[in-house]
Image: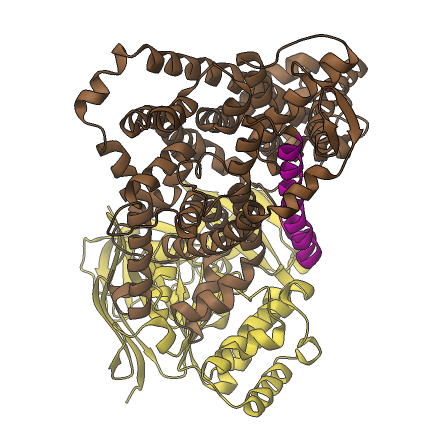
Amino acid sequence: MRDIHIKIRNLTKRFGDVVALDKVSLEIERGSFATFLGPSGCGKTTTLRLLAGFYSADEGEIFFGDRCVNEVPSHKRNATMVFQDYALFPHMTIFENVSYGLKIMKLQTKEIEERVEKTLKFLGLEGLRDRTPGMISGGQQQRAALARALIMEPEVLLLDEPLSNLDAKLRVNIRAELRQIQKSLGITTVYVTHDQEEALAISDSIAVMNKGKVVQFGPPWEIYYRPKNTFVADFVGVANFIRGKVSEITSQNIFVNIEDQTLSLMNHQYQVSTGQRVVLNIRPETILMSKQIPESHSNVLSGKIKTHTFVGQFIRYWVTSGRREFIVDLHDPSSIGILNGDVYLQLPSSKLHLLPAED
Amino acid sequence: MIKVLREPLLLIILLLVFLGLGFFVLYPMASVLTYPGLQDFLSVPKNPRYLRAIYNTFIMVMLSTSSAIIVGFLFAYTFTRTNVPLKKILRIISLLPLFSPPFMISFSYILMFGRNGLISYTLLGHRFDIIGWHGLWLSETIAFFPLAALIMEGVLQSIPPSLEYAGRNLGATGLKLFRTITLPLARPGVAGAALLVAIYVLADFGNPIMIAGSFTVLPTEAWARVSGWGDVTGAAVLTSILLMPAFLFFLFQRYWVGKRQYTTITGKVTLMDIPPTKWYIRWSLFIFCTIFSLLILCIFFGLIAGAFTKGWGFDYTPTLKHWQHVFSYSKPLTNSLYFALIAALVSSSFAMVSAYLVCRKKFIARRALDFAAILPAAIPGVFFGIGYSLSFNTPPLDLYGTSLIIIFSMIFWNIPIGYQTAYGGFQQIASSLGEAASNLGAGSLRIFWDIELPLLKSAYISAFIVSYIRAVTTLSVIIFLVTSTNIVATFQILNLVNDGFIGQGAALTTALLLLTFLILGCARFLFGRKIELFRI
């Protein structure tokens, strides 16, 4: 049986006339790493702040285990947070910052010393205990903020875009480090980001949000390859959409008419009926592209390369095929060189994903 | 509201703050406004003395505000946009009037340029009479241009230099650049400064009482009603008339200009090289600023010289006898010191707590609290003083002749100083710091004590010093409240000058000035250069 740690039920939050969060419900497993992902203004930070207790809910409940925490004030929730700007107290040393929560708990000085020492060591901050936040680097500040949150041995760890102020390389390193720490401590963690790559890399499950609602909640793999609608497909990763109409359904395959031709895709228990308008989605890296016509003729489109951009680990092509345009990523460009002119695109039936058509 | 209710201590503090502001700001205001009957207000147009005071006040507001703004702007422009020699010294001199009692300028100008003046008579042999509207105009210009300069310096600094560089880049130079880029961008700031200065000119009591002679303005006429005829009703009517424009200017400044200004003023000051100014502009500005700086230095010179001179105007023998008087009768001076210290301490603390509540807590009537805390900034000192004399000389709270009535008036008159400083301070502290502390288990008061207070230390000290200076130098607020038992230095100086004891008056003013700079020196010594004074 799943061990649910955080349960959110019909959570609604309004700011004046603006509905920031609209009847959100979801469940997060104990010890897992859950990420709220979405564009700015989608309600992800609002959700986090509701969990932290900085806002109070207009409707709905939040449960930590069996305990409803709606009425529990922020300083009694034991859900510590790492802030986007770290919010390290500028007038205190790193030691004072990290020990702040323990002091409020009125622990013995000796115990505080020991725990701070341990935590600073764990996060590689030993030498910095007497510095003030202004005297250390961004990455170190980020770790100090994490130390301050972790030392409380919180029930829930909340992270509000904690990596967004770091430069790209550091971000990737600390991301891995953060995931490692979370796994080793087994703390249920809620993370907020607008960076889809970060979300995919770090999470056990992702809640994609848009306009105050959770659009899809599931593991990264599912979010990426089985998005529920065009918003998720488009927001997470790069999507190629092909509009069409279902022409035939078998237990194995679904056939979709796209104007001049029919594409087949594997039937993953899609709830569709013949004649229904649908959108097909395929990721750029799963499209096969070649100068020669492929041996198998199914799902092959002819096209012409419009332009390309060289990104290093792959080349991205924009290919026009009839009135459509496809984005195709070819890896290992060194072996093929840069293509141009007329090409053939093959869309593997196992890589095509079916989405409901939107108006 | 629910959140506040959950913390009973906070609720009690909130109630105390409301009670304090209600009882010591709103209640005295209401007392003045309701003291005269409707008939008294309606008969104003029939009283030629009143009409003259209104007319004179109007004239002075126009004249002094315009001149203070022009001088202030030129100073601000010189400091921010040119490289004149002695810039630092000129700037420090230009700030000095902010630290001195307002009447000191008039007093000193009488000594320098009056009928027996050192410069006008002794050196130049002219029986030139500075008493009257022109003397008042000069004094008020000198008294208030530093404030204008300070505000407009902020405005000019907040205009990103890149905009002016962009203008130059597109071919605008000199006057054209100034007229098409700099001035339009500074306009809201200049308007804000003008309104603020106008409020100060309206409320000015010290200068007109010293130097205006028979040229009465509303505050001095109100004082004359009480001191000459015992006509409190008349004084209440006159100060109520005074309150109206002051209040309007205040509203306009805060809610219209203030809003437009705020966003730019808080922006970080970007340091960029000052592009060169044409030599004749630079030197004209230098000469201009030097002349006004000399006029300021004159004040201090005249005063200190007066304090050590036997008989001003006819016998310039040095003497210390005025100081014997100051020390043998030191009560006004010690009273001033104690009252102002206590008032500044309580006022800035009260203001700090109010600002904390408004900035960090959600409760009903939050905006009302905000308004009440800045309201005294709109109230002319004489109005405030009359309010206190009407409200607290009778039960339920009879404070007649006590130190408390003076201290209370100083506390609440200065609330906006501390409040605005603290408010700005709170805005600068990222709200995530408080949330982080709360997140780690700290309750409201703990957050205030551990996080916000230490970070606001320098703001608090600045507020304390400015409140202290304003309290120790005020004449208008206390003039209706002093008796022989709670007399303060400023009032004693006025008496001495009126009775012709020029030397003693000068000595006492010098002593008062020393007290101000003493506190300032202490603060600098204790807290270093972090203390920003008069940040508007």
Count of marks, rendered view = 0
Between B360 and B436, the one nearer to me in the picture: B360
Residue A218 location in percent, x, y? 35, 71
Q: Colour of chain B?
A: brown
Q: Quadrant of the N terminus of chain B?
A: bottom left
Between B50 and B370, the one nearer to me in the picture: B50
The stretch drawn in magenta includes residue B210? no
Q: Is residue B410 above or below residue A102?
A: above
Residue A344 location in percent, x, y? 50, 51
Quadrant in the picture for residue A11? bottom left
Q: Is residue A107 above or below residue B432?
A: below
- Judge left or right: residue B384 versus residue A342: left
Q: Is residue A144 above or below residue B257?
A: below
Residue A223 location in percent, x, y? 38, 66
Residue A342 location in percent, x, y? 54, 44
Residue shown at the point (63%, 66%) measured from the top left: A133
The stretch drawn in magenta includes residue B521? yes
Q: Is residue B105 above or below residue B384?
A: above
Between A122 and A288, the one nearer to me in the picture: A122
The yellow one among the chains is A
- Residue B336 appears anywhere in the view: yes
- Residue A226 appears anywhere in the view: no
- Judge left or right: residue B183 versus residue B396: right
Magenta residues span B503-532
- Judge left or right: residue B277 versus residue B212: right
> Mostly what secondary structure, the magenta segment?
helix
Residue shown at the point (18%, 27%) measured from the top left: B37
Colour scheme of this structure image?
by chain
